[in-house]
Image (spheres, helix red, strand yellow):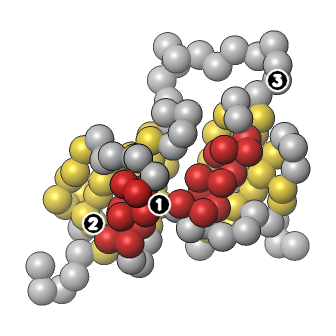
Amino acid sequence: MKNSLYGVIIKVENIDICRSFYRDILNLGAPVMDSAFWVEFRLPGDFSLFLEKKEDNEKISEKAGRISWVCMVKEIDAVIDRLKEYGYQSLAVEEQRVGFNTYVFCDPEGNPFYLCAEKKNSE
């Protein structure tokens, strides 16, 4: 397995729910590493999204802010429909952000991410 040089680690309380969210709802596919405390999704460009289960006595600080990441998808309407079907609503819509249509969502634990699709040439 090729090692990723770039990635984002998201600390989560319920790794099972978050694994299902990223795998099935965002359609990131099967994790390349999957355990009870660590999940790795391989994304394009040698980038990985990691989920790390927090320790039982570990506190996740809200004051430090949350990291957010960008998820580029080809069929954005289908992904948004799937998110809405499972009760996730877009927090914001930015018609164009550096050449992309951008929608802000949160995962089951409130971690924000930007869902993007390239603007079509006709737009």
Viewer-proximal residue, 82 or 11? 82
Q: Which residue is mark 1?
A: 71
Q: Is residue 20 left or right of residue 84?
A: right
Compared with 62, 123 (above or below) is: below
Quick one: label 1 or label 2, which is nearer the N terminus? Answer: 1
Q: Which residue sits at x=40%, y=57%?
A: 85
Q: Is residue 118 left or right of residue 60?
A: left
Displayed quadrant of residue 115: bottom left
Quick one: label 3 or label 1, which is nearer the N terminus? Answer: 3
Quick one: label 2 or label 3, which is nearer the N terminus? Answer: 3
Viewer-proximal residue, 12 or 69? 12
Compared with 58, 101 (above or below) is: below
Q: Which residue is mark 2?
A: 100
Compared with 96, 118 (above or below) is: below
Where disc 3 sits, the SS reads: loop
Tag 1 near tag 2, CB within 8 Å? no
**Amino acid type at image mark 3:** Glu
Q: Position of residue 72 (x, y in %)?
A: 44, 67
Where disc 2 sits, the SS reads: strand
Q: Which residue is mark 3?
A: 55
Viewer-proximal residue, 98 or 94? 94
From the image, state whether disc 2 or disc 3 is nearer to you.
Answer: 3
Tag 2 near tag 3, CB within 8 Å? no
**Amino acid type at image mark 2:** Phe
Q: Give the alpha-carbon distance from disc 3 to disc 1, as whole Å.
A: 27 Å
